[in-house]
């Protein structure tokens, strides 16, 4: 399948610089890169329209507080709400980088969305991000009578997809059915190198070297690869996952993670649907300024919620 023209343009800009002669990957200062990633990603997501209000607040957790951004669309007619976990390889990304896609998800699903700023590696390696997502989700649920009584869905892209999977299981183990659905885009599932990593190792935005870098920083202790809070397929409670929509890009080194997840969930009787978008790359849902397929994917999330998450 040929690449979407907008995606071709994105890659042409990303791939302009030649690799160093010795093949060594040179990475910019992480603090500087985080700022660049936030700014570029927010621009790439395109215009944000039809949002009634955006509000930042602090979720006060044990020993720490985390920033949360609330999006309320002009049409907030669906009587449910969602919590969004951003991607970025567990080392970068924020509510700023994913401001656009979280807002667009709110508009598409006609739902209030809370976007969470969890702690990042290497300063805070695993399981800090997991703890943040679980604890902040609990805090958001508890902060109002409306939230406690309203159906909840989780959403996340890439690293955020992994955090959604883990958080939904943890919350549903505490209170069965409290997370009623999840929407995950090109998720990290097992951290294993599958054939798609070789197939799309370079030239398609996310690279094999990126995946190694993220894994080493997020999981510096190799034993963590056997922890079900990292490799979700090892969870003894995977059957508590809510109805799940997986959105994949066909030109993505993480592509092969999704079918493995789908098969595991189906085998446990979990409702799961897997949509593959052709001609796009990892991160395409955050590239609405360049490809219409971003909007199509977000609209698909709305139809999935129509079928699988009903107001109580």
Image (cartoon, rainbow, N blue to C red):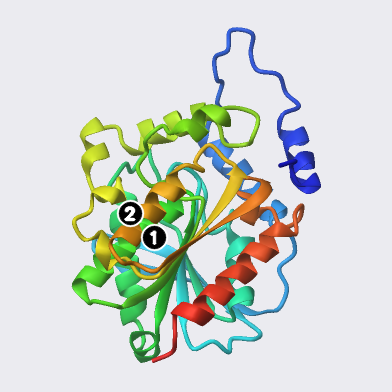
**Few, some or many residues within 10 Å of mark 1 (<14, 14–19, 20+):** many
Q: For numbered disc 2, what is the local secondary structure?
A: helix
Q: Residue at x 46, y 50 (%)?
A: 187
Q: Position of residue 309 (x, y in %)?
A: 44, 81
Q: Quadrant of residue 310?
A: bottom left
The residue that mark 2 highlights is 264
**Quadrant in the picture for the C terminus:** bottom left
Res. 111 visible in picture: yes
Of the image marks 2 and 1, the number of the one nearer the N terminus: 1
Residue 43 placement (x, y as % from top left):
71, 53
Tell me what residue is drawn at x 61 percent, y 62 percent. Answer: 101
* Residue 85 visible in the shown view: no
Q: Residues within 10 Å of mark 2 (few under 14, many from 20)?
A: some
Taking the image as shown, residue 220 lies to the left or right of residue 308, namely: left
Q: Is residue 29 left or right of residue 285?
A: left
Residue at the location (55% across, 26% down)?
27
Where is residue 182, by image quadrant?
A: bottom left
The residue identified by callout 1 is: 164
In this rendering, would 35 be left or right of 267?
A: right
Mark 2 or 1: the one toward you:
2
User: Quarter of the image containing the N terminus?
Assistant: top right
């Amino acid at each position: 399948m040929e690449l979407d023209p907008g995606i071709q343009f994105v890659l042409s800009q990303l791939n302009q610089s030649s690799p160093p002669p010795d093949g060594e990957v040179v990475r910019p200062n992480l603090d500087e890169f985080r700022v660049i990633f936030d700014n570029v990603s927010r621009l790439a997501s395109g215009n944000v329209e039809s949002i009634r209000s955006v509000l930042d607040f602090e979720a006060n957790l044990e020993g720490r507080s985390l920033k949360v951004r609330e999006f309320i669309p002009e049409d907030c007619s669906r009587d449910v709400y969602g919590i969004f976990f951003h991607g970025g390889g567990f080392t970068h990304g924020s509510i700023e980088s994913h401001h656009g896609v979280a807002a667009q998800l709110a508009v598409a699903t006609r739902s209030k969305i809370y976007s969470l700023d969890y702690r990042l590696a290497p300063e805070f390696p695993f399981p800090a991000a997991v703890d943040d997502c679980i604890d902040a989700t609990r805090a958001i649920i508890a902060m109002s009578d409306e939230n406690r009584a309203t159906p909840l869905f989780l959403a996340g892209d890439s690293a955020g997809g992994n955090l959604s999977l883990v958080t939904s299981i943890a919350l549903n183990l505490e209170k069965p059915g409290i997370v009623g659905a999840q929407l995950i885009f090109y998720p990290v599932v097992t951290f294993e190198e599958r054939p798609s990593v070789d197939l799309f190792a370079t030239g398609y935005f996310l690279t094999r070297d990126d995946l190694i870098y993220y894994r080493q920083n997020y999981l510096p202790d190799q034993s963590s690869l056997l922890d079900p809070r990292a490799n979700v397929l090892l969870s003894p409670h995977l059957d508590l996952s809510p109805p799940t929509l997986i959105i994949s890009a066909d030109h993505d080194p993480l592509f092969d993670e999704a079918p493995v997840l789908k098969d595991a969930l189906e085998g446990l009787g979990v409702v799961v649907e897997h949509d593959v978008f052709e001609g796009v790359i990892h991160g395409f849902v955050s590239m609405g300024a360049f490809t219409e397929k971003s909007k199509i994917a977000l609209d698909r999330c709305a139809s999935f919620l129509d079928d699988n998450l009903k107001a109580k």
